[in-house]
Structure formats: structure tokens, C-alpha cells
């Protein structure tokens, strides 16, 4: 696995003092990165005695690192069956090895056994990426990936853009670096290479614009805004490595402006830091490290800075990004975080993922970039930028088959950001009356056959965020009890369009649309009056009845009774007939506007039977008092049954 070289090879040097503690020969070879020899020694030790649980895990790790996934999985499973308290980091390694030798369902079965001990985000990430990869099995790349000319037989990785050049890390021997015995590779150094018009990097040279060191200098990032190069380097006094009280030589992050100015940014005698990335817009410095709050191996963190000077404690990106595996190489482009992880649900050892970033610093589910960028091997160190009128130019590192060395740099030119296609929506569910967000509203996506694809609920502010593998036709629905339902169907280009900005959905609260009147629930309407002795629907009456149409469109489950009343003026028989004609006219209008006939159970005229005051026959009343008796009500009959 490539992770051994880029991270474990770092750790070899940063843990150089391990010999102060009593170790077996197998332990020594394991910590020296000599996994094949470590396996032989551990096997001898097993014949002569018993391996400790830690040594047994080292043996499993050794098989994993040399690519013998079958033997690795057998040992991991054996350990797990004896002690299910296995760390989440080694549990991830077990699932990694199983994924190489077994069906996904077996991996999922073991995952289910530790479900309560794993974060909800990890389980959701796994389900999403399994589904995403399965739904994109026939996707073909529409761009070509090329191996750059400047690669060597050694490890070349971690590219970064530097003015009109490319910087990268390499373990190639150049006479300025010592060779580390167990690996046979040189201490890492930083190189620069010019780029031709097609993006190829040729004839690399040692990068001179940073301070000299006999030891590691690697994983650079150039900030155009600050004019500084951030990079990883060994803690040393120039001639000698510096060790902590625990015998460790850790890796620090420093920055240099290429004009003799250098300063350490992150430095801890017992903690190594990897892969710096500076986000100019926020002043945040991202990096990978393995602190006590790590979710597994190395996690991605950031610190706030002021022109590169640290202004905060490290902040973990959380379980949406960091996993029981190792996360490295953060890179931000157009509000998307790209990083690499060896979590078990990937395509290879390490895969490159993309997660969209929100204004509140939250992250969407990381999406595997898919075959092509990712391979069955290790892929990491992804960078990308706009390339004038030629689309996008990007690079990444991989130890895939067909390369020139242990790790090679690969480039690509592409018209749009690469990666498996998803449908990602975010926005707010809003109460259309108050314009406030609706909390705990249900947001669902349906496929073309009407099957629920994904369901989420809004937060206390009415915000939601939902993402699924892309489909050509999707129905989007928002609902909540006593609220109307928003439902719209989109396809193809329209789905692309609605992802570009916040997708807000408006729903109405039923309690804002009805009221109590005369001891019953009625649709809330302004008072309206028919012309004297008439039952024609005037424009003024239609305007109010359209509110009923809107209510029924939003709440088609409601059942109605239409009732009309007259005042006492005129004969009782003619008033009864007039009120019935008015109820029937209202019903006819509602039906014409699309209200279902099955929703209107009754239309009744009561005439002057239910007066609201004492203005009966023979009593003198002002018109305003008579008018209170002339009314039409749209009664909701099944309110109590529904709610």
C-alpha cells in the first residue's frame, strides 16, 4: 500500500527512538518498514512461543501492506472474533482486507456487528458510496490521464502549483540527501518542474527557494496570496535529527518565502504533521496529524492563522470527513474539499474523495471520485485549478499498475470537475405565511417509479442538505403534519440547474388557513356577499373562493361542507331556495377550479334558520346587523379525524 511510503515512511523517521524499549526482531523489522522480513520473524516467534495481541496485529498489518489480503483478513477476523473491542483503526484494516477477498455483503455484515460503536456519519458515508459506486459502474472518463515525463523509479508524489511550475515530493537520490537503509530510498526532497502547454512536467530540479536540510522536506503547498511555501520537514538542528524525551523525531510544518525567511508553523516533539494546505479566503491552515482525538489513524485538522501565524488550537474536521482509517492531503477548490482516505468502502488502498463545503463549515457526504482518478491501488494528493480557456488542469499521485516508480505523478485536462455524478440539494423549508424556516420537516426524494430514494429532516432553522447518486428523474417533496406538501418533479438539465443555488420549498401551516367559527372548523375567508337576491359568483366572491381552492390543492385530504345562510328579510321559503342556490353556485365554482367532487360532501342552504342575532321577522334591525346573518361557510368536516 502506498500509505506505507508516504506516511509510514515518515513515521519510521519520526519514531526512530523506538529501540529504547524492548522489542523483538520482528517488531524492529516491522517498525523499519521491512514487512516481508517482519512476517518471517513473527512466524518464527509463533513457532517458538506466543505472539502478543499487538504483535499479532503487526503481523496482520504486514500482510496487508504487502498485498496479501487473504492472510491479513484471516488474522484480523481471528483477533476480532476473540476480542470485539479491536480498535476502530484496525477494524477498518480488517474491512479493507475483507473487501479485497470477499463480497461487499460480508463486509457489511461485520460492519453491522460494530454499528453501535461507529459514528452515524461513517455508516451513512459507507452506504452512500457503496450505492454511488454501484450506480456508476458503466461511467466512462471523458478525459485522458497521463503519466508525467518527470517521474522517476522512486516515489514522486504530493504535487502543488507554484507560479507557472509544479512542485512535488520525491525520494529520488540526488546526492544531497542520505539514504535510509531499511527502505533503500533517499530522505524526501522537494522538486520543481516547468509545465508545457499540455500540462506535462519535465526535467525536474531540486527546489532551491526553501531552507536547506539533510533530512525530510516534503508535501509542499504554495500560497500565492502570502508568497510562502508551506512544507513538512524533519525536526533537526541542521546536522542532526532532534529527538523528544520519548525518543521520537517528529515532522514539523514550516513556511519559507524563498528569500531566506523561514519559520516553523506547527511543531511538536512527539507529533508529526503532514500535507499542509493554506486556504487564503479564511486564513485556515489545513493539515493531517494523529492527535489523541483522532477518529482512527491520521485525521485532517485546521488551525486559524493570521498571515500564516497560528491563532488557534487544531480543530478536527469531524466524523463526516475523518474515519477509522487514515485521511491525508486536503485541498480546497471552488468550495469543495478534496482529500484521500484508506477507509474500507473505497475502490483501492487510498482513494480520493470530494466533499462540498457549506458557509457554516459543515461538509456534505464525501464522494468517491470513481474509476480513472481512483484505482485498485493508492491514489492521493489531488490538486486542480482553472486553466484559462482550456478548462481545468489537475494532478494527483498513484502507485497504480503501469507507472514508472513506487509512486508517480499523473496529470489530466478536463472541462468540468471530475468525480462520480451526484444530485446534491440544500436549502430551507419555509412557512409561506410567516416566511420562517420549518423545523423537523420531512424532505424526501422519489425515483421515477415513486420509490423513496432518500429521506432527511430539517434542522431547527428549517435547513436541509440531501445528496444521492444522480438519477435522470427525481421528485422532491417536503412535508410535515398539519402542513401542506411541496412536491415537484424535475429531470436532466433542470436537475443540474437547481443544484447551483439554494433550493427552498414553501409549505403552509393548516392552522393559518382555518379558524373556529360557530363551533366548527371553517376555511379562513374574508366576509363576502352575493348581490341582493342573487346567487351569481362575482369577481369579489371568486377571489375569496380561490383561497379555498388553494387550501384544497395543499390539503386534498380535507372533506368539506358548503353552507349558506340568509338574513330574515324576505320570505322564509324564498330565502331557503336562495341559500341553496348560493351553496350550489359555490360548489360549482370550486369544481370548475379543480377541486375534487369527492372532497365536497355537502352543499346546504339553511335560509334564515340559523340567525346569529335577534334580527328575526318583525324585528327592526340596521343593515349591518342583518348582514351578520348573511354568510357562507366552508366547513372542514374531518379535521378531528385527521389531526
Image: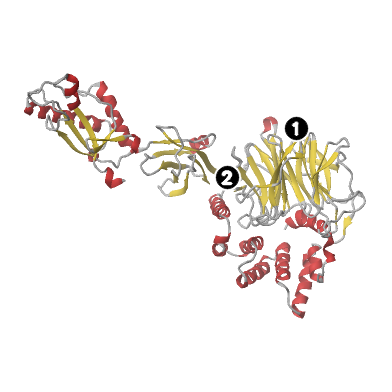
Q: Position of residue 87 (x, y in %)?
A: 65, 63
Whether 567 is drawn above or below 262: the answer is: above
Whether 280 is drawn above or below 37: the answer is: above
Whether 470 is drawn above or below 96: the answer is: above
Q: Position of residue 343 (x, y in %)?
A: 64, 56
Name the residue carrying label 2.
364
Front-lying residue, 463 or 12: 463
Residue 75's label in the rendered image is: none
In the image, what residue occupies the spot 83% across and 36% down?
A: 257
Whether residue 553 can be seen here = yes
Whether residue 104 can be seen here = no
Label 1 or label 2, whichever comes before in sequence order: 1
Q: Position of residue 298 (x, y in %)?
A: 70, 54
The quadrant of the picture occupied by the N terminus is: bottom right
Contact, CB < 8 Å: mark 1 with mark 2? no
Q: Residue furthest bottom?
A: 48
**Label 2 SS:** loop
Name the residue carrying label 1.
225
Q: Is residue 392 left or right of residue 197?
A: left
Front-lying residue, 27 or 418: 27
Answer with the quarter of the image where residue 530 lies.
top left
Q: Position of residue 416 (x, y in %)?
A: 62, 37
Q: Is residue 257 left or right of residue 140?
A: right
Front-lying residue, 604 or 293: 293
Neighbourhood count class around disc 2 (C-alpha, 10 Å): few under 14, some 14–19, many 20 upward: many
Q: Is residue 603 left or right of residue 74?
A: left
**Label 1 SS:** loop
Q: Is residue 91 left or right of residue 163?
A: left
**How far is the residue under mark 1 from the one under mark 2?**
27 Å
Amino acid at each position: 500500500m502506498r500509505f506505507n511510503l508516504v506516511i509510514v515512511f515518515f513515521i519510521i523517521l519520526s519514531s526512530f527512538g523506538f529501540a529504547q524499549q524492548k522489542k523483538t526482531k520482528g517488531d524492529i523489522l516491522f517498525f523499519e518498514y521491512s514487512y516481508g522480513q517482519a512476517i518471517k520473524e513473527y512466524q518464527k516467534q509463533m513457532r517458538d512461543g506466543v505472539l502478543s495481541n499487538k504483535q499479532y496485529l503487526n503481523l496482520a498489518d504486514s500482510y496487508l501492506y504487502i498485498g496479501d489480503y487473504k492472510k491479513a483478513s484471516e488474522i484480523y477476523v481471528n483477533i476480532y472474533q476473540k476480542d470485539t473491542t479491536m480498535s476502530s483503526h484496525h477494524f477498518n484494516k480488517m474491512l479493507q482486507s475483507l473487501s479485497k477477498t470477499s463480497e461487499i455483503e460480508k463486509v457489511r455484515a461485520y460492519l453491522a456487528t460494530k454499528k453501535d460503536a461507529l459514528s452515524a456519519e461513517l455508516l451513512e458515508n459507507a452506504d452512500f458510496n457503496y450505492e454511488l459506486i454501484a450506480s456508476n459502474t458503466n461511467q466512462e472518463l471523458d478525459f485522458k490521464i497521463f503519466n508525467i515525463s518527470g517521474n522517476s523509479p522512486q516515489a514522486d508524489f504530493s504535487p502543488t502549483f507554484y507560479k507557472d511550475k509544479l512542485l512535488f515530493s520525491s525520494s529520488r537520490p540526488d546526492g544531497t540527501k542520505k539514504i535510509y537503509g531499511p527502505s533503500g530510498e533517499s530522505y524526501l526532497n522537494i522538486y520543481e518542474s516547468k509545465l508545457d502547454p499540455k500540462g506535462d512536467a519535465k526535467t525536474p530540479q531540486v527546489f532551491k527557494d526553501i531552507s536547506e536540510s539533510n533530512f525530510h522536506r516534503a508535501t509542499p503547498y504554495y500560497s500565492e496570496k502570502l508568497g510562502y511555501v508551506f512544507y513538512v520537514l524533519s525536526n533537526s538542528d541542521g546536522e542532526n535529527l532532534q529527538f523528544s524525551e520519548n525518543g521520537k523525531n517528529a515532522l514539523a510544518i514550516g513556511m519559507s518565502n524563498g528569500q531566506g525567511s523561514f519559520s516553523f508553523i506547527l511543531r511538536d516533539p512527539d507529533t508529526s504533521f503532514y500535507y499542509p494546505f493554506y486556504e487564503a479566503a479564511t486564513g485556515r491552515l489545513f493539515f493531517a496529524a494523529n492527535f489523541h482525538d483522532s477518529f482512527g489513524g491520521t485525521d485532517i485538522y485546521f488551525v486559524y492563522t493570521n498571515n500564516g501565524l497560528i491563532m488557534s488550537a487544531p480543530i478536527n474536521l469531524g466524523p463526516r470527513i475523518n474515519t477509522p482509517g487514515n485521511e491525508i492531503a486536503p485541498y480546497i477548490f471552488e468550495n469543495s474539499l478534496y482529500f484521500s482516505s484508506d477507509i474500507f468502502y473505497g475502490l483501492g488502498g487510498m482513494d480520493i474523495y470530494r466533499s462540498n463545503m457549506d458557509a457554516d463549515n459543515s461538509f456534505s457526504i464525501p464522494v468517491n471520485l470513481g474509476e480513472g482518478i481512483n484505482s485498485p491501488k493508492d491514489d492521493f494528493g489531488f490538486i486542480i485549478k482553472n486553466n484559462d480557456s482550456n478548462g481545468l488542469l489537475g494532478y494527483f499521485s498513484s502507485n497504480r499498475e503501469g507507472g514508472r516508480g513506487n509512486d508517480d505523478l499523473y496529470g489530466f485536462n478536463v472541462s468540468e470537475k471530475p468525480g462520480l455524478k451526484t444530485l446534491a440539494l440544500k436549502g430551507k423549508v419555509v412557512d409561506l405565511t410567516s416566511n420562517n424556516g420549518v423545523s423537523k420537516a420531512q424532505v424526501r426524494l422519489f425515483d421515477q417509479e415513486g420509490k423513496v430514494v432518500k429521506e432527511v429532516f430539517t434542522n431547527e432553522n428549517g435547513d436541509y442538505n440531501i445528496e444521492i447518486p444522480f438519477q435522470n428523474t427525481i421528485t422532491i417533496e417536503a412535508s410535515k403534519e398539519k402542513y401542506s406538501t411541496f412536491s415537484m418533479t424535475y429531470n436532466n438539465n433542470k436537475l443540474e440547474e437547481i443544484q447551483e443555488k439554494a433550493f427552498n420549498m414553501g409549505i403552509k401551516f393548516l392552522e393559518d388557513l382555518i379558524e373556529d367559527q360557530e363551533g366548527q372548523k371553517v376555511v379562513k375567508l374574508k366576509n363576502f356577499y352575493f348581490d341582493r337576491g342573487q346567487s351569481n359568483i362575482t369577481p369579489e366572491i371568486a377571489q375569496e373562493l380561490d383561497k379555498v381552492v388553494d387550501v384544497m390543492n395543499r390539503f386534498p385530504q380535507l372533506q368539506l361542507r358548503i353552507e349558506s345562510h340568509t338574513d330574515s328579510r324576505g320570505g322564509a321559503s324564498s330565502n331557503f331556495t336562495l341559500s341553496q342556490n348560493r351553496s350550489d353556485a359555490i360548489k360549482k365554482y370550486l369544481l370548475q377550479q379543480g377541486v375534487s367532487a369527492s372532497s365536497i360532501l355537502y352543499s346546504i342552504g339553511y335560509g334564515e334558520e340559523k340567525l346569529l342575532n335577534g334580527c328575526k321577522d318583525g324585528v327592526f334591525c340596521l343593515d349591518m346587523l342583518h348582514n351578520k346573518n348573511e354568510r357562507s361557510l366552508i366547513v372542514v368536516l374531518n379535521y378531528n379525524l385527521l389531526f
